[in-house]
Amino acid sequence: MNTKKLLSAVTALAIAGSLLSACGNNDSSAPSSAPQSSAADSTADSSSDSLPEESSAPDSSEPDTEEGYQLLWSDEFDGDSLNEDIWTREIRDPGWTNNELQAYTDSDDNIFIRDGKLVLKAIKVESGNATGYTSGKVNSQNKADFTYGKVVVSAKVPEGQGLWPAIWMMPQDEGKYGQWPKCGEIDIMEVLGSATNIAYGTLHYGEPHGEQQGKVVLESGTFADDFHEYSVEWEPGEIRWYIDGELYHSANDWFSAVEGEQDKPYPAPFDQPFFVQMNLAVGGNWPGDPDETTDFDKAEFEIDYVRVYQKSEYDTDVKKPEKLYRDPDETGNYIINGDFSQAEDLSDDKQWTFYLAEGGAGAAEIKDNTLIVSSTDAGSQEYSVQMFQPGLPMIKGKKYRVSFDAKADEARNIVVCVSAPTAGWGRYLPDTTQAITTEMKTYTFEFEMTEKDDNNGRLEFNLGKYGETATVYIQNVRVEEIS
């Protein structure tokens, strides 16, 4: 097979020193078992190929070329007002997506340049007994679209319950593969104002909705303390996420399909022109609503620069990687350390993982071949106190059995499921409430896998939400294939 190359416009189109682009309704909700991110929707129209002349070509004041890349376009926000040859001020009504509360406006109160930085500001608006919010969102759609490259953004996020800053990318022509998520979405950075020590990078695609997410958790300080550099390297067969130059997540296995039909040729949907957008949302399914602690005087998302680079050429002759599926142990068990013979680290995202969120508080340990989960606050969600193990092979048409022994210090309920964290948080074993007693007993559940093959099924024990905090003891966990 002949190797195909995509020559970037950096090489192919140089006009009078200006570099031109190489380019030729999202509504996701939070899962019931673990955090999920999705930035807001975008509609797309066909448009012109070229980038704005005055900001396309690097000059002495613009950044140096990244190693292996050439600068395609950038905005350093050095002017007195937003460069509308690159950016469009997006206008949207409240509730347009994700149940967010803000109205995006074109007002200079919400979108402005200050001290060489773009500021997207959220404003609380009181009218009689009603409270509303306005905010800012900008996008480069139909002005600075490109296919493949490196996007680098320096930004400082705001703190505050209900604030949700995002830097993300959507396709110029959403109709090429179909409405979200079939069209694809690349989230370069999302941070929740209530937890500004964590930054997320996420890929959305497919039907059913698939996603892959990485995150960085700061050991000290927050992403609201100072500017950090968020970047994505997008290539035909791989997408990589960085913060301050450090790689923290990569993806090379995705798809685009109408449910029930064959997948589109890989690497669809990430083989078409995309554009950059940035916004500061207020409220919504993931961050929750603002409260009395949210200081809207400081609700500002600041962006120091946006820089887009491309390589001189890209090899587009890529193949989808073959999925790897975990083998069971000699007893047929797909769970690793299901007998809890290893006192493993439960915070390292390997094998068993203990997770707290949404007000959940507690601790977990492995002792005497027993997983012990103690809670001091059940939190507001079932997954607020959670133990899980991912990486389970789920093959369409096969039947599986989940079994475990459990007891508690006093009678209580737990919720058991096998979820799909990279396939839209679906359920292969539905959320099942199980009453457990003070006596160790064996519990068994069987199900048939009816969805597309997935090498990342996730067994979950959810102990949150219902005010029950009795310590739970779990032994002998098994997930096995049955005839």
Image (spheres, helix red, strand yellow):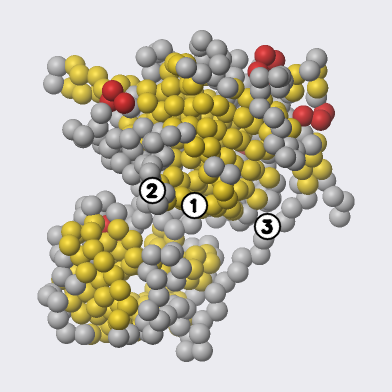
User: Horizontally, is 407 left or right of 47 in the view?
Assistant: left
Nearer the observer, disc 2 or disc 1?
2
Mark 1 vs 3, N-terminal side: 1
Report the front residue among 332 and 432.
Answer: 332
Mark 2 vs 1, N-terminal side: 1
Q: Residues within 10 Å of mark 2 (few under 14, many from 20)?
A: few
Secondary structure under the numbered disc 1 in the rendered image: strand
Q: Residues within 10 Å of mark 1 (few under 14, many from 20)?
A: some
Secondary structure under the numbered disc 2 in the rendered image: loop
User: Horizontally, is 373 left or right of 230 in the view?
Assistant: left
In the image, is residue 315 above or below residue 170? below
| The disc label shown at residue 214, or none | 1
In the picture, which quadrant includes the N terminus? bottom right
Nearer the observer, disc 2 or disc 3?
2
- Residue 449 image point, x, y percent: 46, 69
Mark 2 vs 3, N-terminal side: 2
Q: Which residue ends up furthest to the front in the rendered image?
A: 220
Q: Residue at x 85, y 50 (%)?
A: 3
